[in-house]
Structure formats: structure tokens, C-alpha cells
Image (cartoon, grey):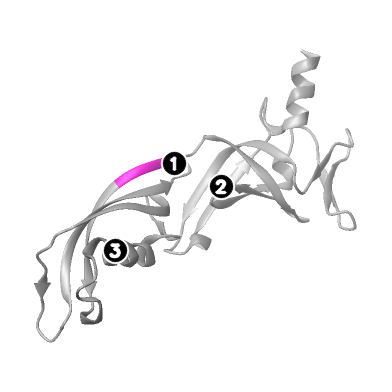
Amino acid sequence: MYKLIEAEDTIRIHPSKFGEPLEKIALEELKDRYEGTVVANLGLIVSILKVQVSEVGRILPRDPSTHHKVRFKALVFQPLLHEIVEGEVIMIEDIGVFVRLGPVDGFIHKSQIADNELFTYDRHQSIAIGENTRRVLAKGDIVRARIVQVSTESMQTRGLRIGLTMRQPFLGKLEWIEEKKKKK
């Protein structure tokens, strides 16, 4: 789920940037500090959108920079447990499937690809094949899945881990879902 949030912080403006527009400097500083980082209980900061800077700054002892309070809006991607998401298969490995979910990737273990069916990995073709139905899952396929695990471990994008499942009704490769709907 994407959210717009409002936050406050303090930025440091180096003397070499004195005379430049405060909003421009603040936007650059906040983008460097936050964009692409994961904040626990919040999610991945995708973009800093709007900045308001206090014109009055503070000077700290032995620091020639000025420190200004800022209020800003940010676009955040926050994956929620049990949320239904759609994404593109970007990689298939022996252990499972990686799916692009906008700004981050999710992972589907091979046991979570479909109900009552084991998928095996064909290394030569880089596809997953269902042992009973012979259904094929390949790079570029669009899938619908449910988020079953969200883990934020650090302030890096690698720290956001999303576990997915397609072992529920109306989840899976979009063509498989259409086939099920036609049968019913």
C-alpha cells in the first residue's frame, strides 16, 4: 500500500550552500537522507515530495553550518500483512520465484506457488513447471499473491523482505485465475 506521510526533521546547511534557495537545499538533503531507505513500522520511502523550511536556523558551537527545521511530505510503500498484490515475475530459482511489487521485490517459495501442486525448476528454460498440471510460470508473467510476511531489518532496501503465497483461491498467474473463473 502506498501512503502519503508528513514528517519533521532538521537539516544541516553547509556554508558553501548559503545563498541558494532553502527549499531546494532542503529537498536535496532530505532526498539523500531518506529516499530508498526502509523505516521500521513505516516502510520504504519512495520519494520526498514537498518541503517547508524554517527560514530561521540555529548555529551550533564549532559548526559553521546552519540547522533548520523542516516539514515534508513523502510517498511511502508499506506492505501490509494479508494484502493482495500483483506483480511481475522477475526471476525463477530452484527455491522459488521473485516478483517485482513496484519499488521492492517479494519472494514466493516453490511450495507456495499453487494449492496441491509441487513446482519444479527447469534450469535450462528458467521456468517453474507444475508436476501434475504442467502449468508453466516464467519470467515476465503477471501474478496475484497475498503478503504473508513482512520483515524490516535495516535502513537499506535489502532490509525489507516480503514473503508471498499463491496457495489460496483466485491467486496465482493471472491466466490460471481466468481459467478457474471460466470453469465455474
Name the spot of residue 156 as percent of width and height, x first. Answer: 46, 64
Disc 1 is placed on an element classified as: strand
- Label 1 packing within 10 angstroms: few (<14), some (14-19), many (20+): few
Q: Nearer the viewer, residue 90 or 117?
A: 90
27 lies left or right of 155: left
Judged by its main secondary structure, the magenta piece is: strand
**Dots 1, 2 in contact, CB < 8 A:** yes
Q: Which mark is residue 2?
A: 1
Q: Is residue 40 above or below residue 181?
A: below
Q: Is residue 75 above or below residue 160?
A: above
Query: Mark 3 or mark 2, which is nearer to you?
Result: 3
Looking at the rendered structure, the kind of residue marked 2 is Gly
**Residues in magenta, as a range:** 1-5
Q: Quadrant of residue 176?
A: top right
152 lies left or right of 22: right
Looking at the rendered structure, the kind of residue marked 3 is Lys
Q: Is residue 37 above or below residue 49?
A: below
- Label 2 packing within 10 angstroms: few (<14), some (14-19), many (20+): few
